[in-house]
Amino acid sequence: MSTNSLVSTTKLGEYFAKLPACKANGTNWIFFRDCFLFAIDAAGLSDHFDDGPTGTTSEPTELQVANPTNLTAEEKDAIKQYPLIRCIWKSEQAVIK
């Protein structure tokens, strides 16, 4: 589990509450975008934001095991933690959206 998931929603509110309003005519878009990117980075969520052509990041995938009938302790632990990791990732992704 990443340390990013330890940021409380109160702290996230502090980062994003200070963003300037993006004007409808787009005259302050560059300033708004820079502030938004800074807030994402300060909140530890920059790996949820891809500023490329697609603008998406990839969701964590479940561990693929070679021998599902004979799992190691690490594989069992990773499989057990996957739902929680995915839930945290989705929550952090929702904050960015």
Image (tube, rainbow, N blue to C red):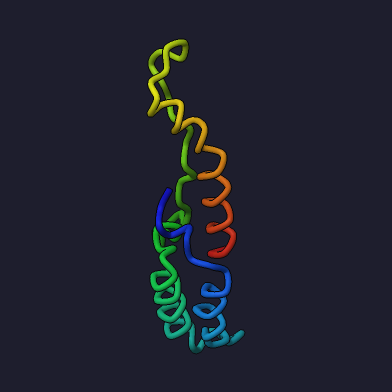
Q: Residue 66, how many percent across, how many down?
A: 38, 16
Q: Is residue 70 left or right of residue 12?
A: left
Q: Residue at x 45, y 57 (%)?
A: 48
Q: Furthest-top residue in view?
A: 69
Quarter of the image that includes the C terminus: bottom right
Seen in the picture, residue 22 relative to 60 is either above or below; the reply is below
**Image coords of residue 73 (percent x, y):** 40, 25
Q: How many marks?
A: 0
Judging depth in this view, the residue of 32 and 93 nearest the camera is 93
Residue that appears at 53% across and 67% down: 8
In the picture as drawn, the residue positioned furthest to the front comes out as 73
Q: Residue 82 location, x and y as percent?
A: 51, 37
Give the residue at x 52% y 75%. 11
Up the image or down, 72 lies above or below 50; here it is above
- Nearer to us in this view, 18 or 79: 79
Instruction: Residue 74 in the image: state x and y as whole percent.
Output: 38, 29
Q: Is residue 11 left or right of residue 47?
A: right
Pick whichever, 20 or 78, lies toward us: 78
Q: Toward which corner of the image does residue 63 lie, by quadrant?
A: top left
Instruction: Say if 78 sits above or below 85 in the image.
Output: above
- Give the left or right position of residue 21, taking residue 59 as reference: right
